[in-house]
Amino acid sequence: MSFAQSVLAPWALVMTWLLSLGVIVWCLCLRPWRPLLEDTALQHRWMAATLAVMLMWQLRAQAVDWLTLHLVFTVLMTLVFKMPLALISNVMINVAMVAIGRNDWSLMGANVLVTGIVPAIVTGFVWRIVDRRLPDNLMVFLFACGFFGTALATLGGGLSAVALIIVAGTDPEAVYLAQEYARFLPLLMPSEAFITGMLLSILLVYHPNWVATFNDHRYIDLQ
């Protein structure tokens, strides 16, 4: 989900812009373009995945004028390409949404935060737990990161959007609708979790080396 029209106070728009910009600058400081320059196949996969996600964002439900519901795929991008490249893809997709008139430019910071940064952080947290504390098992990785992690990240992104509207909303009706929307978040989590888990399982079966967070030697060769 993402914001299509501004219902946030100006101070919240500035704050989300600064926060999102700070995270993106941190990602750029990690020099994520290095593996892209070294691996032409990775370039093609990353660009193709970014384009595919951008096209999937066009399949959306516009319940109200200012809120759009759609699949995000940030968890899958984070697991496959790791956080820096996933967030850069998210920024590119959000820029494309502004360019084609889907979203308002002033909401770029809020949308990057809700659709990119929060889900990516939740995904990274879940992956760290799986990588360090859970058994080295393919099914554990798939279900913990692919299904449970996606559901948790979707919940985190949704709650962050609701919290923004409740704290900084300028329209009382929007604040009321956001509170009502929070009740339906558990119904939106399974769809994103199922599709992400299914796509991740296909990658792990046929191309496990494409998933940057998956160590096929640990999870497959040593079993």
Image (cartoon, grey):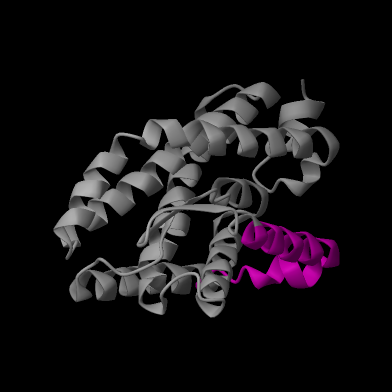
Q: Relative to residue 115, is residue 123 depicted above or below?
A: above
- Magenta stretch: helix, strand or loop mostly: helix
Q: Residue at x 26, y 66 (%)?
A: 7
Magenta stretch, residue numbers? 29-55
Q: Position of residue 74 (x, y in %)?
A: 55, 51
Count of labels shown? 0
Q: Position of residue 22 (x, y in %)?
A: 38, 72
> Is residue 132 in view?
no
Q: Is residue 52 magenta?
A: yes
Tell me where residue 112 sits by quadrant: bottom left
Q: Residue at x 19, y 74 (%)?
A: 11
Q: Position of residue 201 (x, y in %)?
A: 72, 32
Residue 58 vs residue 72, the one in the foreground: 58
Q: Residue at x 67, y 72 (%)?
A: 33
In the figure, is residue 143 to the left or right of 212?
left
Quarter of the figure that contains the C terminus: top right
Residue 184 vs residue 86, the one in the foreground: 184
> Is residue 42 in view?
yes
Q: Position of residue 52 (x, y in %)?
A: 70, 58
In the figure, is residue 43 to the left or right of 9?
right
Residue 126 vs residue 190, the one in the foreground: 190
Q: Relative to residue 159, is residue 198 depicted above or below?
A: above
Residue 131 vs residue 164, the one in the foreground: 164
Q: Relative to residue 37, is residue 204 depicted above or below?
A: above
Q: Is residue 50 magenta?
A: yes
In the figure, is residue 206 to the left or right of 219?
right
Q: Residue at x 25, y 48 (%)?
A: 177
Q: Relative to residue 121, is residue 29 depicted above or below?
A: below
